[in-house]
Image (cartoon, rainbow, N blue to C red):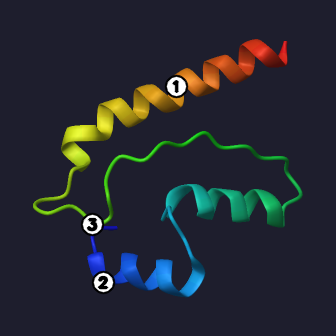
Amino acid sequence: MDNAAFRDYTFKTFEANVLDMETAATAQVAYSNGVPYIAFRSLSDLAGGGPGENELETFFKIAADNSATVLLAFLAAWK
């Protein structure tokens, strides 16, 4: 999602601070099939909100590392 106008629209319409496509689709399939589901995500860009090019390439590894850290902490606490 790299569209500043759509980002503004979703905030004004739904007060959405975060946009996500992949996790939402997976969650819907799990819900429809009665399968418990939890996701750990972190943001990698501003969905068209940055002043220049999309920041995905800059923050992708940091976002992935953050998600992995949260997942590992969750699993350690779950034991």
Residue type at mark 2: give it.
Answer: Ala
* Image quadrant in which the N terminus is located: bottom left
Res. 24 image quadrant = bottom right
Mark 2 lies on a secondary structure that is helix
Query: Of residues 47 and 28, which is closer to you in this image?
Result: 47
Marks 1 and 3 sit apart, C-alpha to C-alpha, by: 25 Å
Marks 1 and 2 sit apart, C-alpha to C-alpha, by: 31 Å
Query: Of residues 78 and 29, which is closer to you in this image?
Result: 78
Vertical order, 56 against 29 (above or below): above
Residue at horizontal 71 percent and vertical 65 percent from the top: 28
The residue carrying mark 2 is: 5
Residue at horizontal 54 percent and vertical 71 percent from the top: 16
Vertical order, 9 against 31 (above or below): below
- Who comes first in sequence, dot 2 or dot 3? 2
Q: Where is residue 76 shown, x and y percent of the image?
A: 73, 12
The residue carrying mark 3 is: 49
The residue carrying mark 1 is: 68
Residue located farthest toward the right when viewing the structure as drawn: 34
Res. 38 image quadrant = top right
Contact (CB < 8 A) between labels 2 and 3?
Answer: no
Contact (CB < 8 A) between labels 1 and 2?
Answer: no
Q: Where is residue 39 shown, x and y percent of the image?
A: 65, 43
Residue type at mark 1: give it.
Answer: Ala
Going by the image, does 45 lie left or right of 43? left
Contact (CB < 8 A) between labels 1 and 3?
Answer: no
* Image quadrant in which the C terminus is located: top right
Residue type at mark 3: give it.
Answer: Gly
Marks 2 and 3 sit apart, C-alpha to C-alpha, by: 9 Å
Q: Where is residue 52 shown, x and y percent of the image?
A: 10, 61
- The crowd level at tag 2 (other Cα within 10 Å; few <14, some 14-19, many 20+) is few
- The crowd level at tag 1 (other Cα within 10 Å; few <14, some 14-19, many 20+) is some
Marks 1, 3: nearer the viewer = 3
